[in-house]
Each structure stands twice: as structure tokens, then as C-alpha cells.
Amino acid sequence: MQERALAIAALYDRHNLAAGRGTWGPEQFMTGFVGDVGDLAKLVMAAEGRRGDQEGDVRDNLGHELADCLWSVLVLARHYDVDLVTEFQRMTDGIERYLESGRS
């Protein structure tokens, strides 16, 4: 999945350069990610009946925005040389230990 995300990022780089714009760095990817999270929040609100201003199929749009967010996370992880599989395991192991310990 990460290789596919990076291939798409490379296509964006070529597209932006051909259009006379610069390539994106981590700041631009992060800004895009924040925008996608905002779009996702609006769709979740619509799916839960809290907003009625969303166009199209909310369920399909939710899938698209979740994938957009994942794409940004995958690209940022590669930029910062973060092994997401290892970090996810470490994070969930820590949560599991905490919750099973009975501490609150």
C-alpha cells in the first residue's frame, strides 16, 4: 500500500512541475492531510444525521476521505522513515497492557 501511495505522490510531483508549480514537501502533505481530516469530520457528521449539506453518497464519500487520509499518513511515514507496522503494533500493545492492567 505504501509503495502505491508513493507512486501517486511521484505522479503529483510530475503533474505539478509540468504545471509550473513546485513539488510538495512534508508541510504541504500535512496541510493536505488536515484538510482531508476536516472533510472526513463533515462526512461523519452527515452520516450521523448532524449535517445535511453533503452532496452525493455519504458512504462512498466517507471511503474516499478515509483513503485520502491514509494516503497522506503513508507518504508522511515514508518521508520520516517511520515503520507504521512496527509503530502500530507498539502503540496497540501499550494500550492493551494499560487497559488490561485495570488502571484508570
Image (cartoon, rainbow, N blue to C red):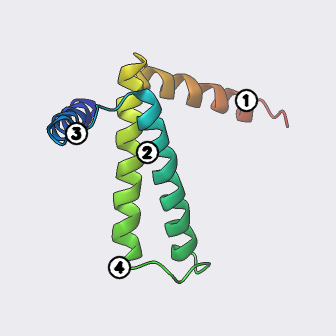
- Amino acid marked by disc 1: Tyr
Mark carried by residue 32: 2
Mark 3 surroundings: few (<14), some (14-19) or many (≥20) residues within 10 A: some
In front: label 4 or label 3? 3
Residue that badge 4 annotates: 56
> Gap between marks 4 and 3, in whole Å?
28 Å
- Amino acid marked by disc 3: Asn
> Gap between marks 2 and 3, in whole Å?
15 Å
> Gap between marks 2 and 4, in whole Å?
22 Å
Question: Which residue does the image show at 68% across and 27% down from the upper left?
Answer: 97
Which badge, 2 or 3, is on the more N-terminal residue?
Answer: 3
Q: In this rendering, does residue 43 appear at all?
A: yes
Q: Position of residue 69 (x, y in %)?
A: 42, 47
Residue that badge 3 annotates: 16
In the rendered view of the protein, which quadrant contains the C terminus? top right
Placement of 64 over or under 13, stated as above or below: below
Tell me whether the residue at label 2 lies in contact with that at label 4, contact meaning CB atoms closer than 8 angstroms. Answer: no
Question: Which residue does the image show at 22% across and 34% down from the upper left?
Answer: 13
Tell me whether the residue at label 1 lies in contact with that at label 4, contact meaning CB atoms closer than 8 angstroms. Answer: no
Q: Say what secondary structure mark 1 lies in.
A: helix
Q: Position of residue 101 (x, y in %)?
A: 77, 29
- Amino acid marked by disc 4: Gly
Mark carried by residue 98: 1
Q: Say what secondary structure mark 2 lies in.
A: helix
In front: label 2 or label 4? 2
> Gap between marks 1 and 2, in whole Å?
33 Å
In this orientation, which residue lies closer to the viewer: 82 or 99?
A: 82
Q: Say what secondary structure mark 3 lies in.
A: helix
Tell me whether the residue at label 3 lies in contact with that at label 1, contact meaning CB atoms closer than 8 angstroms. Answer: no
